[in-house]
Image (tube, rainbow, N blue to C red):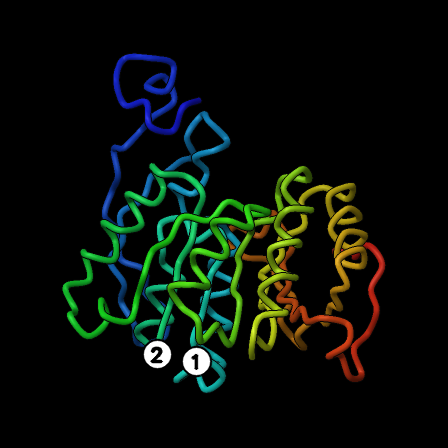
Amino acid sequence: MDEDDDGGGIGSLFLDENYVEQRISIGHHDIPVLSLQCSSTDYDLTGQIIWPGTELLLNYIVDHSQIFQGASIIELGSGVGVTGLLCGRIGCRKVVMTDHNDIVLKIMRKNVALQQDTALLSRIACEKLEWGNEEQLFLILDKHPEGFDYILGADICYQQCNIPPLLRTVNKLLQHHHCRKFFLAYISRIQSTDRAFFNEASEHNLELREVEESRTSPGDGIYSGVIYEIILKRDCHNCRTFSAPNI
């Protein structure tokens, strides 16, 4: 599908922009966002809905807000943007939300504007980033030369083919300036994808550590989830090495 096709062509067969406004209540924060209630028939537009792993990451951020206050954040696969909006509300000094799809970026930007908070808006940016695309990544880093303290991602490993470019991008970001770690809300769905994820992490020089007491079953309990802290191997102290997870 051509992402820019908004006429009567093939793209319009998949495009659904009938968004519903809902309020995401987390901690003492109440965040209005527009999203679809079910996923588009085009897998490339999955960012139009809020996925189970987002709930897991939102709860982690609220429960550990002291980690993120005053920090600079880049989020990969931000979708409608609820995680980045929460980061802005808890006091992150800068939040860059990213997605590769122009339609998803459009709704993400609408959700930023929906907040009607001038101070919040000044701390949040939305950027196009296709995983593995070094040109797009370098453009973002040129705009934000001071780099980022943390990388965030929620429920972004559901497609096995996207794992290698995702982890290449994570590796590049972790090598940039003072970037400390990648917080990933990981949802296990298919064991072959789990194995691919852990194998690729090792190939890309990444070390994983399960956050204590983060294992849970988000939403309706169908999927098991966990928060991982991911860093470059050379920076790892007392981290456990993982094979494919039993989740």
- For label 1, count other residues whose C-alpha is less than 10 Å away and answer few (under 14), some (14-19) or many (20+): some
Q: Is residue 51 above or below residue 19?
A: below
Amino acid tagged 1: Ala
77 lies left or right of 22: right
Residue visible at 46% across and 65% down? 74
Residue visible at 80% across and 48% down? 195
Measured as percent of width and height from the top left, residue 7 is found at 25, 17
154, 1: nearer the viewer:
1
Q: Which residue is mark 1?
A: 71
Distance from label 2 to label 1 (Cα)? 6 Å
In the rendered view of the protein, which quadrant contains the C terminus? bottom right
Measured as percent of width and height from the top left, residue 1 is found at 44, 22
Q: Is residue 106 above or below residue 31?
A: above
- Identify the secondary structure beneath mark 2: loop
Amino acid tagged 2: Arg
23 lies left or right of 246: left
Residue visible at 52% across and 64% down? 152
25, 127: nearer the viewer:
127
- For label 2, count other residues whose C-alpha is less than 10 Å away and answer few (under 14), some (14-19) or many (20+): some
Give residue 93's mark: 2
Measured as percent of width and height from the top left, residue 140 is found at 43, 59
- First in sequence: mark 2 vs mark 1: 1
- Identify the secondary structure beneath mark 1: loop
Q: Is residue 224 above or below residue 177?
A: above
- Answer with the quarter of the image where residue 217 lies: bottom right
